[in-house]
């Protein structure tokens, strides 16, 4: 008689994952045709994900191509025991899309920084003030670097690029609750780090 605690049978991989795993093995051996086959079979999944995250067709197309360029370079690192090919491709796509969102947020932040605010009289910054601002900026950047990549990206987009929580959810493809939780937990961590260094947030 079977034990009531017997483990459930392992779930069989989908036919797509079996095919994609074969492609990845061949790509790891330098087979460019296998890369083309993998692209033909899976690029609609990757493009759909990146389009939801980025909200821009041109950016999604570029990131999708970046994903398959990375597959070509790192196919040897794929380990079927750690996840399915589809999960690996989705992970690469999410990582690349988040990188693109961070880069866009940083670019917009730099662009706003060089725009002089209207009707603000010029005032020379005293050396002591400049040093204090530089030190404060350094501490904030150091604290941000401690956060997880996901928390840091969302906080930078929310506070430096001005995106609302809803806009972030739409751009990243994450549930609204996940966006709020990651930002909240990231801000709590930032407060702790900055209070330890004598800064207030």
Image (cartoon, rainbow, N blue to C red):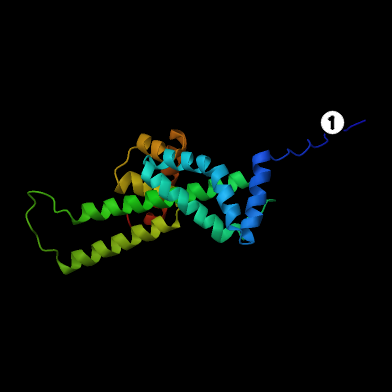
Give the residue furthest to the right: 1
Q: Could you say whether the residue bearing mark 1 is in a helix, strand or loop?
A: loop
Residue 177 shows in the view: yes
Pick the front one: 85 or 6? 85
Q: Quadrant of residue 133?
A: bottom left
| Mark 1 burial class by Cα count in 10 Å: few <14, some 14-19, many 20+ | few
Q: Is residue 192 left or right of residue 84?
A: left
Q: Residue at x 50, y 56 (%)?
A: 69
Indicate the quadrant containing the N terminus: top left, top right, bottom left or bottom right: top right
Q: Is residue 78 left or right of residue 171?
A: right
The spot of residue 55 in percent (x, y) is 37, 39
Seen at 45% across and 38% down, the residue is 173
Residue underneath mark 1: 4
9 or 185: nearer the eye?
9
Q: Position of residue 182 (x, y in %)?
A: 45, 43
Residue 198 visible within the image = no
In the rendered image of this protein, does residue 193 appear above or below residue 49?
Answer: below
For this view, does 108 lie left or right of residue 41?
A: left
In the drawing, does residue 106 fall left or right of residue 185? Answer: left
Q: Residue 54 versus residue 152: which sits nearer the camera?
A: 54
């Amino acid at each position: 008689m079977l034990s009531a605690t017997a483990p459930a049978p392992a779930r069989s991989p989908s036919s797509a994952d079996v095919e994609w795993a074969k492609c990845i093995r061949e790509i790891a051996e330098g087979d460019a045709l296998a890369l083309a086959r993998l692209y033909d079979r899976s690029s609609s999944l990757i493009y759909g994900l990146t389009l939801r995250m980025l909200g821009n067709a041109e950016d999604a197309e570029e990131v999708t191509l970046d994903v398959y360029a990375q597959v070509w370079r790192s196919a040897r690192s794929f380990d079927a025991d750690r996840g399915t090919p589809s999960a690996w491709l989705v992970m690469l796509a999410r990582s690349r899309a988040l990188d693109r969102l961070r880069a866009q947020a940083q670019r917009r932040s730099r662009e706003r920084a060089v725009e002089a605010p209207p009707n603000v009289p010029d005032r020379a910054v005293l050396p002591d003030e400049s040093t204090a601002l530089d030190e404060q900026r350094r501490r904030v950047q150091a604290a941000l670097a401690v956060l997880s990549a996901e928390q840091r990206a969302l906080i930078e987009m929310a506070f430096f690029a001005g995106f609302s929580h809803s806009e972030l959810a739409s751009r990243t493809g994450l549930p609204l609750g996940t966006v709020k939780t990651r930002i909240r937990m990231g801000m709590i961590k930032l407060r702790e780090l900055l209070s330890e260094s004598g800064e207030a947030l």
